[in-house]
Amino acid sequence: MKKYFSLFILMVMNFVFAQYFQTTTNTANINQNLTHQGRIVLGYDFDSGNQFQVYKNSATAVNVAIGNTMGRIEMGLAPSSGWFSNWANQGDGVIRLLRGKNLNFHMPNNNMIDPASDTSTPTSSGITRIRFSDIANKNSLVIFNTGKVTIGTELYDNSDYRLFVKDGIKTEKIMVEMASANGWADYVFQEDYNLLPLHEVENFIERNKHLPNIPSAEEIVNNGGFELKEMNVKLLEKIEELTLYIIEQNKRIEALEAQSKVSK
């Protein structure tokens, strides 16, 4: 008898779990929780292809939370402006951290633990990435585990530069740091600076078709461009040299004028 009773219980449980649980007895307000195909549905079943769904069949707030006594992470859909975020518009999705301090996105393949990982190119085996994209733009923003960031592309060279922006950057300000005062071009005004005579500058230009200590167009192309800080220093160097030439020429002019007045 016990054997048949146990079998009966198993059959009933199988039937119940094979369907779903209801959280209400009001058939007009049924919330489906579990189904027999490994799917979890909270609210309205809107897509049979999704294994886990949280859906409201109305334009109301929907959010999913993971939390503990230290804080919680929420993912929500705003029913109107200002929901979940002061800057959210109606229909915006928002991920927010409440009571916690930092929201971290962690990628696998930590190269500090595995220094042998190849990260020389964007397609190397040691590269992982967080990609922001839409249906048309594959690489709106890509963050790599090497600390590199690309915008508009996922391709970069194996240089020390961390940011690559395809098609250029438009900004109001750029601050370029200097490691020390010696890195600026004021060395031109030091007494021991070797200011080339103008005729030597002329001969250099005739031979090389560019200014001394300034890279040629061919060199810039072969080097893949130029470093902005370094080029600014070189251009300032030429401006300061030109100022010294003007001062020197002015002294000669004044001397000739004084000599002309004496001869009269």
Image (cartoon, grey):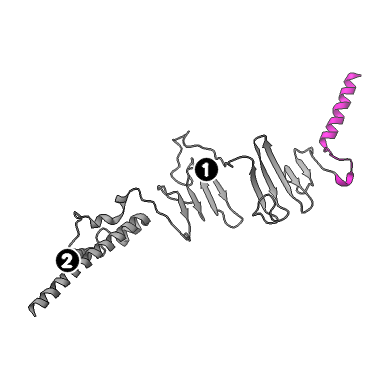
Residue 122 located left or right of residue 104: left
Residue 87 found in image quarter: bottom right
What residue lies at 19% left-to-right and 70% top-to-bottom? 250
Q: Quadrant of the C terminus?
A: bottom left
Residue 17 located left or right of residue 73: right
Q: Is residue 216 visible?
A: yes
**Callout 2, which amino acid?**
His
Q: Quadrant of the N terminus?
A: top right
What residue lies at 56% left-to-right and 54% top-to-bottom? 138
Rendered location of residue 61, percent (x, y): 74, 50
Circle 2 packing at 10 Å, graded few (<14), some (14-19), many (20+), is few
Query: Is label 1 in a helix, a strand or a loop?
Result: loop
**Callout 1, which amino acid?**
Thr
The residue closer to the viewer here, 147 or 81, is 81
What residue lies at 82% left-to-right and 34% top-to-bottom? 17
Figure check: 13 above or below 232:
above
Which numbered disc, 1 or 2, marks the residue closer to the eye?
2
For marks 1 and 2, the one nearer the N-term is 1
Q: Which mark is residue 104?
A: none
- Pointer 2 residue: 199
What residue lies at 46% left-to-right and 37% top-to-bottom? 117
- Pointer 1 residue: 128
- Residue span colored magenta: 1-29
Residue 250 located left or right of residue 75: left
Query: Is label 2 in a helix, a strand or a loop?
Result: helix
